[in-house]
Amino acid sequence: MLDKTCPVCNTPLFRLKNDDVVCPKCNSRVYIVSSEEEESRVFSSLAISNLEKTIATKINDLDNRLQRTSDLDELKLLTMILLGLLDALDKIRKLTK
């Protein structure tokens, strides 16, 4: 148990063996930051990570639709969208290197 409390429910926080800090009541991960600059970096990192996951999910969805379609117009549209998502994913991954 840590000497800090959850910012949402004020329950004491716990550090797990893998160093994650969690709130047992909210059942959520908590990030402890020491400055506004660090907080901004954490939020940016989380936003980029979430965006990357969302784009990967959409790419998977499009792949499934591509496999099922035989309509050439739909195939063209799905391919254009897929190329845009792949480009976005590539740019996101370059940002995080």
Image (tube, grey):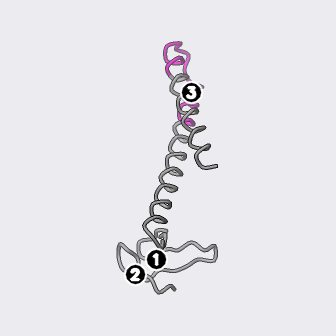
Instruction: Please say whether residue 70 is one of the residues in the magenta stretch.
Output: yes
Q: Main secondary structure of the magenta part?
A: helix
Residue 11: image tag? 2
Q: Nearer the viewer, mark 3 or mark 2?
A: 3
Instruction: Return the residue nearer the eye: 92 or 69.
Output: 92
> Is residue 91 shown above or below 13?
above
Query: Magenta stretch?
Result: 59-77
Indicate the amino acid at tag 1: Pro
Q: Which residue is mark 3?
A: 83
Label 2: few (<14), some or many (≥20) within 10 Å?
some
Q: Position of 64 compared to 12: left or right?
A: right
Indicate the amino acid at tag 3: Leu
Q: Secondary structure at mark 3?
A: helix
Instruction: Please say whether residue 32 is one of the residues in the magenta stretch.
Output: no
- Whole-percent x, y for residue 91 in the image: 57, 38
The residue under the point 57% across, 25% down is: 66
Q: Are marks 1 and 2 in contact (CB under 8 Å)?
A: yes
- Circle nearer the N terminus (1, 2): 2
Q: Quadrant of residue 57?
A: top right
- Residue at the limit of the structure toward the left, as seen here: 9
- Whole-percent x, y for residue 28 in the image: 46, 68
Q: Which residue is mark 1?
A: 24
Q: Secondary structure at mark 2?
A: loop
Indicate the amino acid at tag 2: Thr
- Whole-percent x, y for residue 63 in the image: 58, 31
Q: Nearer the viewer, mark 1 or mark 2?
A: 2
- Circle nearer the N terminus (3, 2): 2
- Circle nearer the N terminus (1, 3): 1
Q: Secondary structure at mark 1?
A: loop
> Is residue 27 shown above or below 94?
below
- Whole-percent x, y for residue 3 in the image: 47, 87
